[in-house]
Amino acid sequence: MILNQITVPSLDVEKGTKFYQKLGLHLIVDARPNYVRFELPDGDATFSIHLVEELPKGDGIYVYFQEENLDATVAELQAKGIEFDLLPTDQRWLWREARLKDPDGNQLIIFSAGENRKNPPWRVN
């Protein structure tokens, strides 16, 4: 089994489309105003946005994007006007993370973890 795609809810797919294109995702399906789908720069999984009338309650959706050149990528995105809630920071779970939100408040974490992504010292055998 492989992960095909992640879909997040949006009140404004047009605004979300522009945001994710600025992040570097490539539009491959355009059914605006209801739905769009993107390829990521690396890997086979895709990412999509679908129109909803109401967003989930609480903390909402968390999406993690792995980027080994985290600090450089964050600097590039900041130069494009992307605002971060947390700049690259080493975390106690051995990942380096930057955090931001998309226009609908979905939580995005861009991280670098190396071998610790799937094999942290506390991994269950």
Image (cartoon, rainbow, N blue to C red):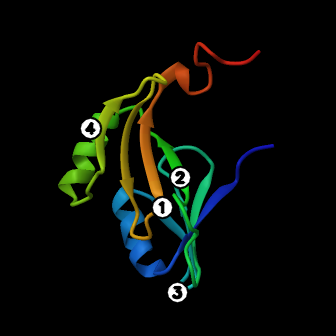
Q: Earlier in the sequence, mark 2 or mark 1?
A: 2
- Specify the quadrant of the image occupied by residue 48: bottom right
Say whether marks 4 and 1 touch (CB < 8 Å).
Answer: no
Quadrant assignment for the C terminus: top right
Residue at image coords 53%, 84%:
32
Q: Earlier in the sequence, mark 2 or mark 4?
A: 2
Say whether marks 2 and 1 touch (CB < 8 Å).
Answer: yes
Q: Residues within 10 Å of mark 3 (few under 14, many from 20)?
A: some
Q: Amino acid at mark 2?
A: Tyr
Gap between marks 4 and 1 measured at Cα:
23 Å
Check residue 33 in the rendering and tell me which mark sits there, or answer none: 3
Between tags 3 and 1, which lies in front? 1
Gap between marks 3 and 2 measured at Cα:
23 Å
Q: Earlier in the sequence, mark 3 or mark 4?
A: 3
> Which SS class for mark 2?
strand
Residue at image coords 43%, 37%:
111
Q: Earlier in the sequence, mark 4 or mark 1?
A: 4
Q: Residues within 10 Å of mark 2 (few under 14, many from 20)?
A: few
Where is mark 1, residue-wise?
106
